[in-house]
Image (cartoon, coloured by chain):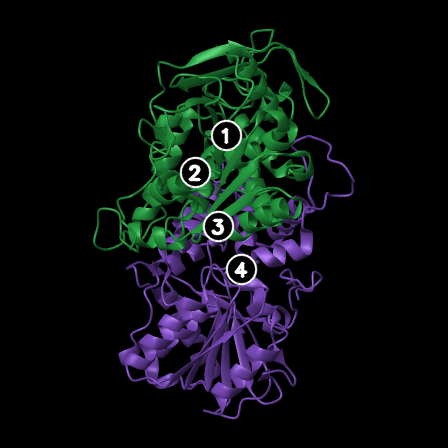
Chain colours: A green, B purple
Amino acid sequence: MIDPGLFVERDSAPDSEGKTVALGAMRLEAGSTLPSVRLAYQTWGRFDGENAVLVCHALTGDSNATSWWDRMVGPGRPIDTDRYFVICSNVLGGCQGSTGPSSLAEDDAPYGSRFPIITVGDMVDAQARLLDHLGVNYLAAVAGGSMGGMQALEWTSRYPQRVQRAFVSASAMRHSAMQIAFNEVGRQAVMRDSRWLGGDYLPGEGPDDGLSVARMLGHLTFLSPGAFEAKFARRLQNKLVPDYHLGIEFEVESYLQYQAGKFLKRFDANSQLILTRAIDYYEGPNFSAASAKYGFVSYTSDWIYPTSMSAEAHAEAVATGRASFHREIDLPYGHDAFLLDGELQGEAFRELMTS
Amino acid sequence: MIDPGLFVERDSAPDSEGKTVALGAMRLEAGSTLPSVRLAYQTWGRFDGENAVLVCHALTGDSNATSWWDRMVGPGRPIDTDRYFVICSNVLGGCQGSTGPSSLAEDDAPYGSRFPIITVGDMVDAQARLLDHLGVNYLAAVAGGSMGGMQALEWTSRYPQRVQRAFVSASAMRHSAMQIAFNEVGRQAVMRDSRWLGGDYLPGEGPDDGLSVARMLGHLTFLSPGAFEAKFARRLQNKLVPDYHLGIEFEVESYLQYQAGKFLKRFDANSQLILTRAIDYYEGPNFSAASAKYGFVSYTSDWIYPTSMSAEAHAEAVATGRASFHREIDLPYGHDAFLLDGELQGEAFRELMTS
């Protein structure tokens, strides 16, 4: 049964406890250099030298892991902040405190179109520097869902000597043609908005309409058809008969527009472009260079990161001689299940940590 | 196996043999009146009083059924133009010759925002008047896929005495929340384009960017994930390594933009809005008022009109005492399968016609 009231609250309040660290210049995988990289991050718990867990967020997340992954991260939760030293940073290219396209360049204007294309590997390199800064040489685990799962995978082959375990939920080694296609339609919605200006819009004057469409499209992929049906069915918005116009008629239309409106307040259009590009490029880790143990989780109702993609990653890890397991979890919430499920996903995480 | 070269050619040349008929003023289901309705139509074969088959097109189709449904309609095909008198008209609200938002109103300006909201029932009422004009009182069958299937369903309860059989392929009685949501994102892409102007753009100055995004979104739903993968995988567009920019990198991106560009040349943005609205409103036929026999076809890989929706319609028809069958066809082409499959779908049509 689907609880129609159970939905993800993505728009958490910024956490005042967050810190920012300057990491210097960074040479990027595509060849260019960012002269000055900062990451916003948070930590929870006490570091004992062997208990660090890096949590990596999904496309539009932030460093506030105890908010967006509250079923998984916190005191007594599977990623137990009473036991582990938990680190989470906003990704390079993001807009929640880390260096991204909306950050000010050396001329005090936003990077905009000058922000370089980045890769999942670049995100991971920046995180590695953050760990250097924190004095963390070694991760007991790196964990994440969706785009966060790609970062976890990349950690295992880019820094094999620094990662003991990778927990990869609702993710994929590499995007399928259809996943690239969904991302591209969202990018086109942004880039075809006349206010995008090639990426050089001013703060507060960005391509809000295009970004709204991209976000509504995103929400189509977050839920399963069954979750949409349980939540909205064909109910009209505050009326019993249609008004017969092009405005809001159905509840699901109101929901999409409401979500888009909330998103505009917290997210930058160029970050949407840069981050979706990065995950479309990602080709997966080199399992033969890795030594970590892998735990893959996927959800039966997740149609945008289907469970077959986790099965393939697990199979490739095993074929390359890695220790790995894959748990397919039967929950009806679609891709969002990885944000909603603490219990079964938590069991899988605990299993990984005792292996 | 998926043949990666097998794809739908939607953009057929206009057929010079098409005719247009003036049907007078029409009172619409939502209450308003269109002062003057014309339908563009084509016919094939000879009418013998008992052999008329009405073919109803999908969202962006036209009256040229032997082009867009060439596997199903033509000499020797399942809907055999040597045997049946086949009629196909462009729907009310369309833009391929029938009265729609881009038609000129009585003041010689396009209707634009003045075009009323229409329903699937209104489409059917206009078709009924076309049949009156042609002297066809009685249909041996009405047939269509997707939106065309909804028209076929509606025919059976709106004009039960005029329809002997309904062939309903890759369709649904009523849209789910998720189907409404997909349509709404496409509408928002159009209506948030600054050139939409509330619907009152001039010919050639319409919301091309918004309509492009809506069409790319449509194409996401036409194919199955497997069909996308077979056709494009992760191949780059005319290069071996990425350029690392926001322009076209992957073949699938080029495909989507190419499809959007072709679509702009033949379709009107307001028709996209009006027709998607109509199918979102549709609530299904009153089976207890109907007397037709039903044949439902669905495809295993069609994720936007999933086979369960055809099964439900069939079950409701049977529960109401109607003769009905449902054939689920295992083909990998997604929703487009109904346009590509003459063989198995054709068998189902022939079975319906002999029942």
Q: CA distance from mark 3 to mark 1?
A: 63 Å
Label 1: which residue? A141
**Label 3 Cα crowd, 10 Å radius (few <14 / some 14-19 / many 20+):** many
Tell which subunit mark 1 falls on. A
**Label 1 Cα crowd, 10 Å radius (few <14 / some 14-19 / many 20+):** many
Say which element carries label 3.
loop
Q: Are marks 2 and 1 in contact (CB under 8 Å)?
A: yes
Q: Quadrant of the C terminus of chain B?
A: bottom left
Considering only order in the chain, which callout, 1 or 2, is on the residue closer to the N terminus? Answer: 1
Q: Are marks 4 and 2 in contact (CB under 8 Å)?
A: no
Label 3: which residue? B110
- In x, y percent, where is residue B40? 53, 68
Amino acid at the residue labelled 4: Thr
Label 4: which residue? B60
Label 2: which residue? A349
Q: Residue at (35%, 39%) from the top-left corner?
A: A342
- Between A311 and A48, the one lying in front of the other is A48
Q: Quadrant of the N terminus of chain B?
A: bottom right
Above or below B323: residue A26: above
Say which element carries label 1.
strand
Considering only order in the chain, which callout, 4 or 3, is on the residue closer to the N terminus? Answer: 4
Q: Are marks 3 and 1 in contact (CB under 8 Å)?
A: no
Q: CA distance from mark 2 to mark 1?
A: 10 Å
Q: Residue at (40%, 71%) from the top-left corner?
A: B124
Identify the residue at the far front of this view: A355
Q: Is residue A211 left or right of residue B83?
A: left
Q: CA distance from mark 3 to mark 2?
A: 61 Å
Q: Residue at (45%, 70%) from the top-left corner?
A: B149
Say which element carries label 4.
loop
- Between B337 and A19, the one lying in front of the other is A19
